[in-house]
Amino acid sequence: MQKSLLWRLLAASCALVAAPASAQVSFSDQTAAAGLTHTHTLDFPNFGNPMVAGGAVGDFDRDGWPDLFVLGGGGVADRLFINQGNGTFADQAAAWGVDRLHHGCGAVVADYDGDGWQDLYVTSYGPAGQLPVPGNHLLYHNNGDGTFTDVAAAAGVNYASAVIPDGYGAVFGDYDRDGDLDLFVAGWEWYSDGNVLFQNQGDGTFVNVTAAAGLVDPLVKGFVPTFADMDGDGWQDLLLISDAGTSRYFRNNGDGTFTRTGGLARFGSLNGMGCAVGDLDNDLDLDFYATSIYWSAGSGNALYWNQGGHVYAESAQLSGVDDGGWGWGIVAFDCDNDGWLDIAETNGWSGQFEDFPKRLYMNDRDRTFTETAAAAGIQFTRQGRGLIRWDYDRDGDEDLVFLANQDGLALYRNDGPAGHWLRLQLDTGAHPGLAPGGIGTQVFARKGSNTFLRYLEGGQSYLSSSEPVLHFGLGPATSVDELRVVWADGSETYLAGAAADQVLTVRSGLPLQVSELHRGAPAGAALSGARPGERVAFVYSLAGAGPGPSRPGLGGLSMDLQQPTEVLGFTRADAAGVARIRFQVPAGAPLKPVAAQAFVLRGVHGADSVKSNAVTRPVLP
């Protein structure tokens, strides 16, 4: 499609990185070599659904190598391919207890109970050999011993609709910011009330809060839900990509409720299938892309550039990404490691969309894209549905899995071009107020004058979820100057000088609470998670949060506070491990943000000290 020169000129002002053009990216089909032998098969005549074929990626055995779960469709059992660490996989579904024969639809991975092991949620229309019935969704709890146990009924998430079998995509997210993962399930059937929000109660159970949250809409034919903080206010909004013109955009009000937001061009006319969220133009906010059906100019996929305040500019046609055929799954990923997110799309249907070529849209860094799937070696033309991105061989570039309805899957290995990279895993185990795995976290990587944003959301493309790791392509750079991690509660962690070409685990600090700060009034701060009797130092900076120096006596810990800093005081943790300090805000304190941080002085000469995240509060009149 002819791209608009005017659009290129206008968009060039938004480009943050004027890098040279990338070398041609290359993929190769490694399905057979990897041992991923699986053919999706439907259970005719009981379940002949042509829209399904899903899967999910997780490191289920915690060996550092991502594993792959795929749904069988009812004609064959589900498969769990455990990564052997040498480019091959072994099907261990039976040993893990997930070789179920059922009418499965979609899958999503997250540690819903915060025990450190990734669990698996699967939507299903019920057992094979019978007609679909409600109440058969699965929540596989990871037992940490190489097995799963289905606890969906006990947890209260085995259904979306109590009357009509329904349930397609699902997503985990912490919409209420209480530190545990809630679950939204999308339903496609008319009048099924199958679009359901389940609130995590923190005890292994969930409660249906759809009505209380203001999300009831029986006309929505939901396919893919996504939780993401689209306006940067710290609260995860809900994108519900849906069929037949029923897609919805819900703004999180921050009080347990959502408000439907309108005004998005073409949003109400989409046959929405898949969704990808990411900073596609490197302007440090989240854009999103939805797949649909391309019939003629003005139809097809939709690409929404974030303008701030839940306002978007739609430009799929101008950007060259509208014609994806009958689109389904989609992922945003930096496949050439140049720092810019590219887009892969799968597709397929009967008639004119049979044997349709898949799409690989390479980011031209000016809000336009160039389609290069065939040139990159992606020859998959089957009935594509789910699509997954992951780095299965841990070589620093992201690979793809295409899932097909009533056909075999395909693993495409990314073979280059070479470029430096950094991958981040997030560990929130020390902070019970943050969701497991760091879902909802924003990370900003700065190199020189260029800054890149990646956001970790617990969602899907279409019936499939990708590896929950943040990937930064760095091009020729061998390090990043600064990593700024903004956790879901707004607290921050900084790392300086991280070397490229590694998988880095970023751990959240201990939880620090700081009260409101008013001129001339008393205030307080409290650190949780210390050991009883430990000495805790409270430090603040009027210059704000940022990368700071390491301090003697803190075990080499670096402050996440800009200089100069001041010590507010010292105190000891009580029997519950909580250290508290009270102080008076000066009457003449400047009306500006103040950043605070706490340090637990642990070990001989502080060698084993630990810290909180940096917390920022404004000084108010």
Image (tube, grey):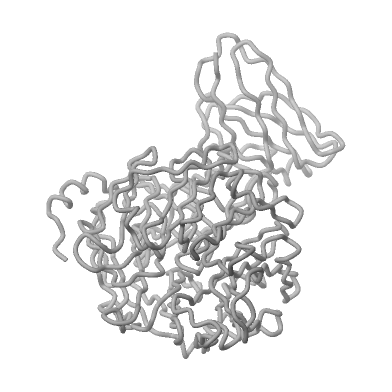
Horizontal and vertical percent position of residue 433: 67, 44
Horizontal and vertical percent position of residue 77: 61, 85
Horizontal and vertical percent position of residue 57: 55, 71
Q: Nearer the viewer, residue 304 or 524?
A: 304
- x 62%, y 10%: residue: 520
Left or right relative to 533: residue 172: left
For residue 158, what is the image quadrant? bottom right
- x 70%, y 48%: residue: 430
Q: Quadrant of the N terminus?
A: bottom left
- x 58%, y 44%: residue: 213
> Is residue 549 depicted above or below 49 in this figure?
above
Name of the residue lying farthest toward the right = 575
Does any portion of residue 396 appear in the rendered image?
Answer: yes
> Is residue 521 depicted above or below 121 in this figure?
above
Horizontal and vertical percent position of residue 477: 37, 57
- Number of numbered discs visible in the structure rendering: 0
> Is residue 520 depicted above or below 56 in this figure?
above
Does any portion of residue 422 appear in the rendered image?
Answer: no
Q: Nearer the viewer, residue 144 or 130?
A: 130
For residue 137, what is the image quadrant? bottom right
> Is residue 363 depicted above or below 87 in this figure?
above
